[in-house]
Image (spheres, helix red, strand yellow):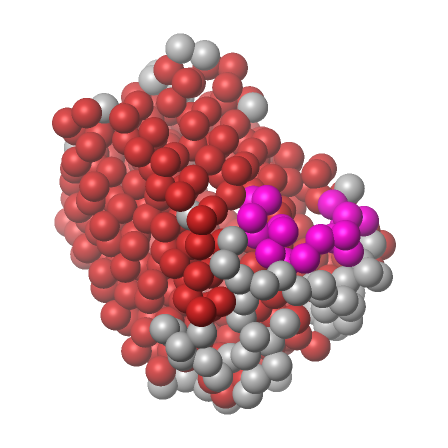
Amino acid sequence: MIHTHSHKFIQNKEVDALYFALSLLSFAEGMISIFVPIFLWSLGFNITSILLFYLLEAVYFVVLSLGFSRFLNRFTDKALIIAGVPFLVLYYGLIPLTTNLHWIIFVAPVFIALYRLTFNIGYHTDFTCASDGDSDDLGDEVGTQYMLVSLMQFAGPLLGGLLIATAGYGTTFWVATAVAAVALIPLLFFKGHKLSIDAITNTSVYSLIFSKEYRNLALASAGYALEATVGGAFWPLYIYLVFSSTKTVGGIYSSIALLMAVTSFIAGRFSNKERYGKIITYTVPFVALVWFIRVFFPGELTILITTPLKSILYAIMIVGWSGIYYLVAKKARPCGTLILACENIFTLSRVVSLTVLLTISLFVSKEILFSVMFFATAVTTLYMGRIAKQAA
């Protein structure tokens, strides 16, 4: 796995195996994730139902995480990561069945929540706790990670959009499911690490969430939550509703993924722990500005201009964000507690924001709802800048 931040890609077999698996999962995600809300819309689900779908995922995560901490010390990071992939495969496999079995909309979110609990916690905990290298190389490491993910997501949406247009949603989802399943193979080729997380409890996790020491990180994570949800699920749906074409959605997201790959790699190469805060300070206001522009200037031109612009800004910002996140999490004891706490902050924030948006959706048109979403995202995005104060 990731033993040190000073390694380089293709020089460490364990790192290469992880990154290869991560690339396959990113490719599968690129084929599916942005099209899930579009698929649900095509089946006749309204915007309220789609909001409920993502709200359920967040609720399931919070509930499941309450019993998760006590089991962490029984598994290695490798076991957690491997355990996550079948949950993702089940999620991808269940989604197309919604065509005839609409009740699956209530079941499928359980599996993506379990994936996040296992794979995400295992991966981020290992990256934080099992590394012992020079933190000055962390920016390079993060930049490489996001470059590989973005490169795979460059091909994924393009192929996904084309497959949907030619073969339908069902075929596309099954192809992506097969790709995700193949990701299990490289995960068998790295050594697991028993992490020092025996002392993680619900009490220790939630004490960090509400502690004064990590207040800035909590606010930043809450701000990140809505930006990630609206940007990842509802902005693609908005693009589809404007252009009425999955090929257009796939083409746009493939283009921005390529931009993000180049930008994140360059940003990672030239960043270090002294620059992470400045990166956040200079980029977050502009990311928020993009969302404000989307509120007041809706339409095709805004989509074509702001989507690539935001992708460049976000790729730079995420290097600084991730750098600070891993450095702060590394100092927390027991190692891994803060990661689980941040995942809960992120998810609890989604529960609150999605509940509010769902309620609003019952009383307004989808056009007004999108404006409310984008405005709320712009405001909460500004809170992401608080992570720079956490590093101070």
Placement of 119 over or under 368, stated as above or below: below
Residue extending farthest front: 189
Expressed as whole percent of the image width and height from the top left, the position of residue 155 reads: 23, 50
Q: Which residue is drawn at the image coordinates 36% and 50% (left, top)?
A: 24
Residue 389: which quarter of the image?
Answer: bottom right
Q: Position of residue 123 (x, y in %)?
A: 56, 59
The quarter of the rendered structure image containing the N terminus is: bottom right
Q: Where residue 313 sits in the image (x, y, percent)? A: 33, 67
Residue reaching furthest top? 100
* Left or right of 25, for residue 129: right
Q: Which residues are magenta?
A: 68-84
Q: Is residue 112 visible?
A: no
Residue located at (24% from left, 38% from top): 160
What is the chief secondary structure element of the magenta stretch? helix
Please state the total of marks drawn on the protein image.
0
Q: Is residue 73 magenta?
A: yes
User: Which one is in front, 94 or 236?
Assistant: 94
Q: Is residue 71 left or right of residue 81?
A: right
Which quadrant of the rendered structure holds the C terminus?
A: bottom right
* Quarter of the rendering containing residue 37: top left
Residue drawn at (45%, 74%), measured in percent from left and top? Answer: 12
Horizontal relation, residue 116 to residue 102: left or right: right
Can you say whether 371 is above or below 39 in the image? below
Residue 388, relative to residue 48: is it above or below?
below
Residue 225 appearing in the image: yes
Q: Residue at x 20, y 44 (%)?
A: 158
Question: Residue 8 versus residue 377: which sits nearer the camera?
Answer: 8
Vertical arrangement, residue 139 with respect to residue 68, above or below: below
Q: Is residue 190 magenta?
A: no
